[in-house]
Amino acid sequence: MAKTTKEKITAKRIKLLKCPTGIKGFDEITEGGLPKNGSTLVSGNPGSGKTLFGVDFLINGASDYNEPGILMSFEETEEELYKNVASLNMDLAALVSQKKIVLEHVILERKDIEEIDFNLEGLFVRLEDAIDSIGAKRVVLDSIESLFAGITDLGILRLEIKRLFRWLKEKKVTAIFTGEAAKTGSYTRHGLEEYISDCIILLDNRVKDEIATRRVRVIKYRGSRHGTSEYPFVIDDQGLSVIPITSAGLEQPGTDKRVSSGIPSLDKLFTGKGFTKGSTILASGTAGCGKTSFGAAFAVESCKRGERCLLYSYEESAGQLTQNMKSIGIDFAPWIKKGLLKIVAIRPSFLGLEMHLLNIYKLVDSFKPKAVVVDSLTSLIGEGDEREVSSMLTRMIDLFKSKGITTFFTSLVSANFKSNTSGEIGVSSLIDTWIVVRMVEDDEGRRRTREVFIVKSRGTNHNKDVHKFTMSDDGISVTPYDESTFNRNEKKNFDKNVAENKKNK
């Protein structure tokens, strides 16, 4: 029988209710959180973060969404749970004392898990009392293997699991069960919970080339769309944070506003207007040719406009960088004192790629810069394979673009700049403006000259000639080659080619 128009409209309005976890990035890939009043299985190998996922879910619910919760643990005592989360700035004890979270440690004896006359009545009584005592809306059971450890009869097991899930649904609580991933490919030891759960989350902690990376994947989500890829996540002092690849998008609006590079003579190469606001700029070149100095000039110019600038240095300390830039008239100290410039100096090997990216996300949220300088991208190469580095940099660039942040990157290239001017990162296609700086020798190697030219600048007219530049106490100055210089160089190159041809013959 065909549906009426009213029935079609009603059916269209039906939407699965979600329970936000409050875990950074996770609610984005699940489009709102976990199924409300449903059951979710969080599976993973030892040390993957299953218990912490559940604790984070409860703490965020009690703190941010006014949803009290119950944590029923079959393995860890209250004191052990307090100790485990104390280093993560999670004040679990305070929420327990405020009766926003109830901790229940259930000690299972051998007689409690005998198959003969096995049932969950005692668990239901204890859970119901805890739920009613604080009006709980969230429940975490850690772990389900401990609860059904001694049951081998699959018939009894399936009936009791279904009964438990149904009971929790009738109590209108959003439930999380943690489980151990089996070596056979199942997401739990018994392999039944995964079929009954409304949602399955798989956590993984893998080590590749001596670098540990945590991953999360939504295996199943009934009645809802969700991201299906593996997403890196980290555990820091604020709990779990997922960095979804889906956040990398192409939705940035265009603009015709410009910002100065901090070098007036360089601005002239862009019709006197400088870089496009909110764009990405890459300065690539060999060691010692002045890439960092270009980035420093841009950072100080941003501060002069009253805009906050974040400078990431992967090669020099903040003190060393400040001292070196003074030699060309660029002084960071006043802007640091005013709170407009923040220098973050850290070795790439100190953290993994995902932790680096997470720190950038957090600093962008807290410091709210309008300009960012990253020196240099090539320092990150050794922290992962080509695909991982490219993924990390793509998400970093899209973060800055989505926030309208003008970003200046530097990239180190080999001495053979003629064959490779973009460096070994391979991000030139994501860059809006690409500048190459280099050191060349003339007069048979007796003189070295710094040169700069613009490879591309999307949406802006720009000078395509090679210019020379100098660095002095007054800063950086870009000047064109005069006609006589070109004529001398052309004659020199012509004579050199003739001599080489004669030698080859």
Image: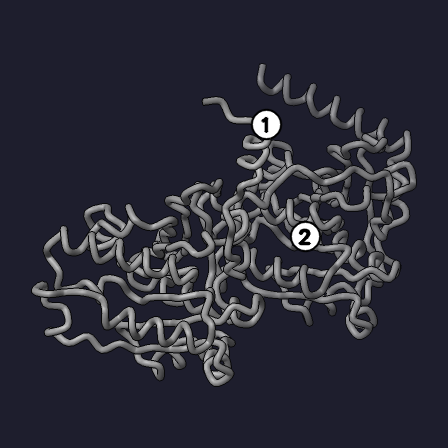
Return the mark for residue 5. Answer: 1
Crowd tier of the residue under label 1, counting other residues whose Cα lies within 10 Å: few below 14, some 14–19, many 20 or above: few
Q: Which residue shows up at 48% across the image and 63% down it? A: 240
Q: Earlier in the sequence, mark 2 or mark 1?
A: 1
Image-based side of 403 in relation to 330, left or right: left
Q: Is residue 304 visible?
A: yes
Quarter of the rendering occupied by the C terminus: top right
**3D distance between C-alphas at marks 2 and 1:** 72 Å
Q: Residue at x 55, y 43 (%)?
A: 246
SS assignment at label 2: loop
The kind of residue on which mark 1 rests is Thr
Structural crowding at the residue carrying mark 2, measured as other residues with C-alpha within 10 Å and reported as few (<14), some (14–19) or many (≥20): few
- Taking the spot 59% from the left edge, 46% from the top edge, the residue there is 247
Where's residue 325, x and y in %?
76, 63
Which secondary structure, mark 1?
Answer: helix
Q: Indicate the quadrant where residue 372 lies.
A: bottom right
The amino acid on which the numbered mark 2 sits, given as a three-letter code, is: Gly
